[in-house]
Amino acid sequence: MSKNTDLIIFGASGDLANRKLFPALYRLHHAGLLEDNVRILALARRAQTSREFVSQLENTLQNVMLAEGLDKGSWKSFSRRLHFLKVDFTNKRDFKDLQHWLVKKRTVIYYFATPPSLYGPISSHLNGAGCIDSQTRIVLEKPIGHDLKSSQEVNDVVGKYFNEKNIYRIDHYLGKETVQNLLALRFANRVIHSQWDNTCIDHVQITAAETVGIEGRWSYYDSVGQLRDMVQNHLLQLLCMVAMEPPNSLEAGEIRGEKVKLMRALRPINIDSVLQDAVRGQYDAGWINGEPVVGYLEEEGRDSGKSNTETFVALKAYVDNWRWAGVPFYLRTGKRMGKKVTRVIITYKESPHTIFSGGQDGARNRLVIRLQPNEGIELEMVSKKQSLEEPLGIERRILNLDFLGDSASVRIADAYERLFLEVINGNQWLFVSREEIEASWKWCDELLSAWREKNVEVKSYGAGSWGPPKAEILIERDGRSWYEGGA
Ligand code: NDP
């Protein structure tokens, strides 16, 4: 049972708030999961009344949630929770209005859905206006810095005002059902966890492919690139959930501690290995879903016709510990790729000796963990072909561990719904600790600096493809190939 809670959203007029945060809160309310004692205060710098804000938000959500629609009764009761206050986040005087709005003895959660450059000023103004006590929580969105040093600066400035136990750093991948299901799959199934190591697993692939380009964010994206935008956070978090040791319990400190250990065991990709183990790409013009699209250098908002920023990364990584010695982890992520998919593929080793026709590869197991589309998990098993003509033939069969089962009416919650509930309940297990962020930046910094030192140029790839040919070579050199099957 949560206490009386005030959820205060900085940046309530922004894209994240409109597309993700308010829809998630509405859905929780509609499902009866948001307790009556939760109030929501939206902060933005445009002057409007609470009533005007609510009416504008209703229109926005009607568009954003077109497929599911808004229930009239639920919206009406939800809107009673909503309040609006005009605050310029750089103006400390405006924070006095916020301080007047707050009521003592309620748990306060500040959600920073703003550019990260405002995290420091907002924290300082909240403190100056007396809006923080020892229980006040904050939620921070990515990116936390663009390298180790800048992430430490962000963590330091926020840490001046908030205790680490009250800081909730979002990586929305951790809010996904399938990612949490990885814990159940690995640690509640003896048959899986006893096979989860280098004696049984041949290699792991993690792919996060997007069909979108940079969506009008050229100036932001060009200073960031795909390694910082996707690998430093989402892909490394996925890798941790796949590869970390069993935590002692589901307590946040235990899980986060195991993830930090895993990140520290990641072998650096440095100037000696970077040319072999890392590929950078940038998309050219091409076709996505039958439509022509421009190349990265022709995107709207570009400031020059040149850029060495990667929109695609493929990596071969190793975890230097007992469990994973010798098992490669192939990571791949890119914009403007042929399909929108996020998945983890665990390929098991071949049987030591096959007595069946059809070759060794036919007798391998594979675990396919899909984050999108169609969140779910499948285990590829090998089974005898039902055939009188071919008495000892084998074939692959899919064991479907689908969440939805037979019921198409079960809805998989959006990651932000789960994450809101965890923040409200004061549980950090699905949020990223300072140590994790800094360990992942340390690893990425070494790779970025190796690219710089070796003057590694991006390789071009056609929009709609799976990245530059070098990404294929990266894995084929080892006698393996990227998994392209399934939805
Ligand atoms: P937007 O630029 O769309 O929104 C930023 C918000 O901050 C707006 O509401 C803006 O108000 C407000 N703001 C900026 N400066 C001030 C100020 N001085 N005073 C008051 N309000 C101010 O960004 P996003 O919503 O896309 O992103 C927010 C955060 O979430 C960023 O850290 C981003 O990296 C992160 N994020 C976003 C994702 C997304 O899908 N959008 C995904 C993952 C992370 P105004 O409208 O008046 O300009």
Image (tube, rainbow, N blue to C red):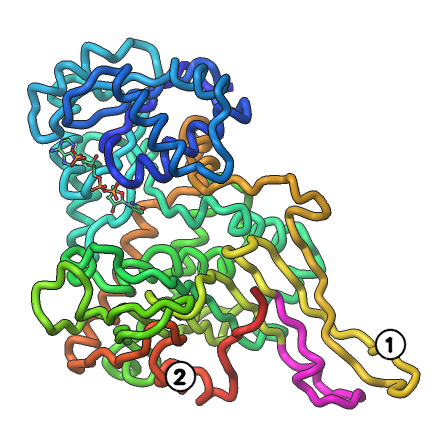
Amino acid under disc 2:
Leu
Give coordinates of residue 309: x percent, y percent: 19, 69
The Cα–Cα distance between marks 1 and 2, rounded to whole angstroms, is 38 Å
Q: Foreground residue, 297 or 252?
A: 297
Magenta: main secondary structure equals loop
Q: Which residue is mark 1?
A: 386
Residue at 26%, 56% in the rendered image: 215
Give coordinates of residue 70: x percent, y percent: 47, 28
- Is residue 107 left or right of 182 when viewed as pictured? left
Q: Secondary structure at mark 1?
A: loop
Amino acid under disc 1:
Gln
Q: Secondary structure at mark 2?
A: helix
Please identify the quadrant where the C terminus is shown: bottom right
Q: Check disc 2: other Cα within 10 Å, few if <14, some if 14-19, many if 20+.
A: many
- Is residue 130 left or right of 35 when viewed as pictured? left
- Is residue 29 left or right of 380 when viewed as pictured? left
* Res 133 quadrant in image: top left
Find the magenta span and give its range. 349-367
* Res 32 quadrant in image: top right
As for residue 358 lying within the magenta part, the answer is yes
Q: Which residue is mark 2?
A: 474
Establish if 372 lies above or below 308. Answer: above
The residue carrying mark 2 has its beta carbon less than 8 Å from ligand 1:
no
Task: Look at discs 1 and 2 and give the one toward the viewer.
Answer: 1
> In what quadrant does ligand 1 lie?
top left
Q: Foreground residue, 185 or 210?
A: 210
